[in-house]
Image (tube, rainbow, N blue to C red):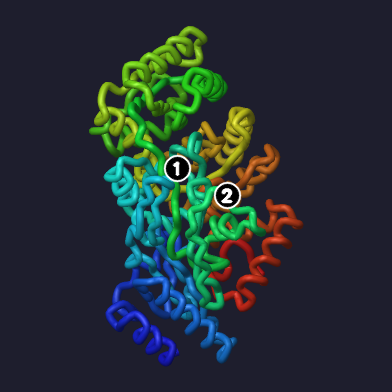
């Protein structure tokens, strides 16, 4: 394989091909669930270099079909399903897109921005704001995740309720195929009905069909006013009622609606006491709402206060606070976004990223909570997520005092099966926004329609016949 590595060095420069030393930043996933071994970490600086690298790998694989050489595209390496790190074979190339981080253009009249896949999400948000626009994709990892990874997993985040997932925010792609050809699809058209929707096929494919190198994304006018409220609710059923009221009172202004269980918030209070979590001791759930509008702040506040007065009168809210400043709003959102880190500090845990129809969420939680408590007495449930679009992070923590590593060894398979079976009974999905990766690829065989799986395999074989692109992820062929 030395000849292949020499070709890599010729394409991108020796300084951007890593084969020894500490490669943990690329070989280990964010949750530290998996640590693989790469043949090399290669960092191209352009789409042309990506295409040359893929062609070199494809040619080498054709000459040495038993070599096991394949490509694992990687952005910020913040994924949660082990989809962007190498296996332990030592034959996979990690193709890091972090050097490809240029904003190529902003088209104010078309309300679009064309950017490279290695752009960090927070930098895109800031660049859009500098141009007096909003790029609404937002999540806890936005300071390190990249747009390519967001597109690869069709990431969601906290504003899906109004703006949709990453797929809904993208108008065009530039992609290097498994043959090393470049598809130039960055036109930024909102209407293009000339055949199969390749853009949406590539988005969410987790690098298994091609490598996204750039995208044209939608921009929106900055809201004139934005307010955040934090409400205590007596049950999930009441949270659903509050969601309905919010839709009626705020309309399109409702951009965020997050639910957080009492235990999830207690972990934030325990591990980050300076954050001062409000109202969580007084109710089993709290809800975080965001209202963004193009009217004055006075009008937006009146809308919000009218909503909360109605909710208090109807008993679906027991207490609430409305942010008085941007810093207060940011602090409330920081509490919500600190739940995953607080849970990690509490110890190893079992994560689930599921979606259920909004109307079925209370019944799902009641039923699944009971099943887990019966199976593992004392198990602790860290339940939070994007209630407005039916996406829960329904996570499971070891009972108090139990060794977390032992809990995972002894109960992870049991817990996953119980939760996923319950999701299936409620006609939900075992992956809402994190993707499938390698962690859920075997589970997908059980919970996905056989017809759908056959179609997915047919697409994979057609676009990547030699299984060069991120093999063993999403679907096995």
How far apart marks 2 and 1 lie (CA) works out to 26 Å
- Residue 200 lies, in percent from the top left, at 58, 55
Disc 2 marks which residue? 191
* Mark 1 surroundings within 10 Å by alpha-carbon count, few (fewer than 14), some (14 through 19), many (20 or more): many
Instruction: In this rendered view, identify the residue nearer to me: 155 or 44.
Output: 44
Q: Secondary structure at mark 2?
A: loop
Q: Secondary structure at mark 1?
A: loop
Quadrant location of the C terminus in the rendered image: bottom right
Residue 409, how many percent across, how many down? Answer: 51, 56
Residue furthest front in the image:
109
Looking at the image, residue 68 sits to the left or right of residue 14; the answer is right
**Which quarter of the figure is the N terminus placed in?**
bottom left
Residue ID at (55%, 74%): 178
Compared to residue 368, the image places residue 172 above or below, namely below
Q: Quadrant of residue 157?
A: top left
Q: Report the residue that reaches farthest toward the top.
A: 313
- Between 328 and 265, the one nearer to me in the picture: 328
Query: Is the residue marked by circle 2 packed among few (<14), some (14-19), or many (20+) residues within 10 Å?
Result: few
- Which residue is tagged 1? 157
Circles 2 and 1, Cβ within 8 Å, touching? The answer is no
**What residue lies at 37% left-to-right and 72% top-to-bottom?**
46
Which residue extends farthest right? 451
- Numbered circles on residues, count: 2
Please determine whether, in this image, residue 225 is positioned above or below residue 128: above
The residue at 56%/35% (across/down) is 390
Q: Residue at x 44, y 32 (%)?
A: 256
């Amino acid at each position: 394989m030395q000849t292949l590595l020499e070709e890599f060095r010729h394409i991108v420069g020796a300084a951007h091909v890593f084969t020894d030393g500490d490669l943990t930043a690329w070989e280990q996933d964010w949750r530290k669930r998996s640590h693989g071994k790469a043949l090399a970490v290669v960092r191209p600086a352009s789409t042309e270099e990506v295409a040359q690298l893929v062609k070199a790998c494809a040619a080498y694989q054709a000459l040495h079909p038993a070599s096991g050489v394949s490509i694992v595209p990687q952005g910020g390496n913040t994924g949660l399903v082990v989809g962007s790190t190498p296996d332990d074979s030592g034959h996979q190339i990690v193709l890091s897109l972090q050097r490809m981080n240029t904003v190529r253009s902003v088209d104010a009249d078309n309300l679009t921005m064309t950017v490279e896949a290695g752009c960090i999400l927070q930098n895109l948000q800031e660049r859009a704001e500098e141009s007096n626009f909003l790029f609404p994709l937002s999540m806890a990892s936005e300071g390190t995740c990249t747009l390519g990874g967001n597109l690869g997993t069709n990431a969601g985040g906290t504003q899906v309720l109004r703006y949709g997932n990453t797929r809904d925010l993208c108008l065009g792609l530039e992609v290097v195929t498994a043959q090393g050809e470049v598809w130039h699809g960055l036109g930024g058209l909102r209407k293009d009905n000339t055949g199969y929707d390749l853009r949406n096929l590539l988005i969410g494919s987790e690098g298994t069909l091609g490598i996204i190198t750039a995208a044209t994304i939608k921009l929106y006018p900055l809201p004139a006013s934005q307010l955040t409220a934090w409400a205590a609710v007596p049950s999930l059923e009441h949270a659903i009622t509050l969601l309905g009221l919010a839709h009626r009172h705020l309309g399109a202004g409702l951009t965020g609606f997050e639910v957080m269980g009492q235990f999830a918030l207690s972990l934030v209070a325990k591990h980050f006491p300076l954050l001062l979590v409000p109202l969580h001791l007084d109710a089993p759930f709290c809800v975080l709402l965001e209202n963004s509008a193009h009217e004055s702040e006075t009008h937006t506040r009146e809308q919000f206060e009218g909503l909360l007065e109605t909710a208090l009168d109807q008993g679906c809210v027991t207490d609430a606070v409305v942010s008085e400043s941007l810093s207060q709003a940011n602090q409330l959102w920081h509490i919500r976004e600190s739940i995953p880190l607080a849970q990690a500090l509490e110890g190893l845990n079992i994560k689930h990223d599921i979606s259920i129809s909004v109307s079925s969420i209370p019944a799902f939680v009641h039923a699944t909570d009971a099943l887990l408590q019966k199976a593992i007495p004392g198990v602790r449930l860290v339940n939070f997520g994007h209630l407005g679009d039916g996406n829960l992070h329904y996570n499971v923590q070891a009972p108090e005092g139990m060794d977390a590593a032992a809990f995972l060894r002894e109960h992870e398979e049991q817990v996953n099966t119980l939760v996923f079976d319950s999701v299936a009974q409620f006609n939900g999905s075992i992956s809402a926004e994190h993707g499938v990766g390698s962690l859920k690829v075997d589970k997908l065989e059980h919970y996905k329609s056989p017809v759908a799986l056959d179609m997915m395999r047919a697409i994979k074989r057609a676009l990547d016949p030699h299984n060069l692109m991120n093999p063993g992820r999403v679907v096995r062929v």
